[in-house]
Amino acid sequence: MYMMVKHLHATFAVLSLVFLLLRVFLAWSSATKLDKPWLKVLPHAIDGLLVASIIGVVVVTGMYPFSVPFVTEKLVGFIVYVVFSVLTVLALRGRFSAKLKAPFAALAIMSWFWLAKVAFMKHGVLLAAI
Ligand code: HEM
Ligand code: HEM
């Protein structure tokens, strides 16, 4: 159970980044590319399953945010990742100055790698002192 849930969790985390990068590359110069039906449905289905897998891995391991420091850091990092992912897609859609596409995408990608590093180290990188 533990290995299955953990692998599902890691798989959806990877797919979430892959679909963010796909949208960045496809729609960098043309926002209409984002209007393909599968690009509207699939990324959100994956992100929804990622959220479900997070709940699953937290319950199965019994490691909850605010009781295990690195899991608290993952929760904070995940909120940062979601915020910058949404800002990236909105920037691709032309909702902000085009200059913001690159910094938003960079911050979303960096926050994803921050979370992956915390996951493998099982240790806070930015927030936890120990
Ligand atoms: C994009 C976001 C995330 C990424 C890239 C990510 C990545 C990973 C990876 C790769 C693992 C497997 C580590 C291993 O094999 O040892 C893992 C495990 C885990 N993740 Fe995440 N994760 C994310 C979000 C979250 C969030 C938001 C939480 C909780 C608030 C969380 C809680 C956990 C827990 C409890 C484990 C199990 C750790 C263990 O077995 O020791 N993850 N995560
Ligand atoms: C299960 C929890 C979630 C719910 C209920 C939720 C809900 C929503 C809703 C209602 C919208 C507006 C949709 C629209 O205007 O068409 C939205 C947009 C968005 N969400 Fe989520 N969301 C969730 C999780 C996530 C996660 C985990 C991510 C990414 C890591 C994410 C990334 C986005 C993005 C990038 C947009 C902009 C989509 C676009 O304009 O094409 N969401 N979300």
Image (cartoon, rainbow, N blue to C red):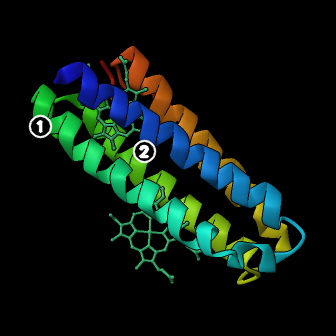
Q: How many marks?
A: 2
Place residue 124 in its image quadrant: top left
Q: Residue placed at 42% from the left, 45% from the top? A: 77
Q: Nearer the viewer, mark 2 or mark 1?
A: 1
**In the foreground, 15 or 78:** 15
Residue 126 in sight in this render: no
Instruction: Tell me: is circle 2 under 8 Å from ligand 1.
Output: yes
Question: Hey, which residue is sitting farthest bottom in the picture?
Answer: 95
Name the secondary structure under disc 1.
helix
Please tell me how crowded label 2 is: few (under 14), some (14-19), or many (20+) other residues with Cα within 10 Å: many
Identify which residue is drawn at 52% across, 37% down.
14
- In the picture of the structure, the residue carrying the numbered disc 1 is 59
Position above or below: 58 against 76: above
According to the image, label 2 marks what residue? 77
- The amino acid sitting under disc 1 is Val
94 displayed left or right of 84? right
As displayed, is residue 98 above or below residue 50? below
Seen at 71% across and 60% down, the residue is 23
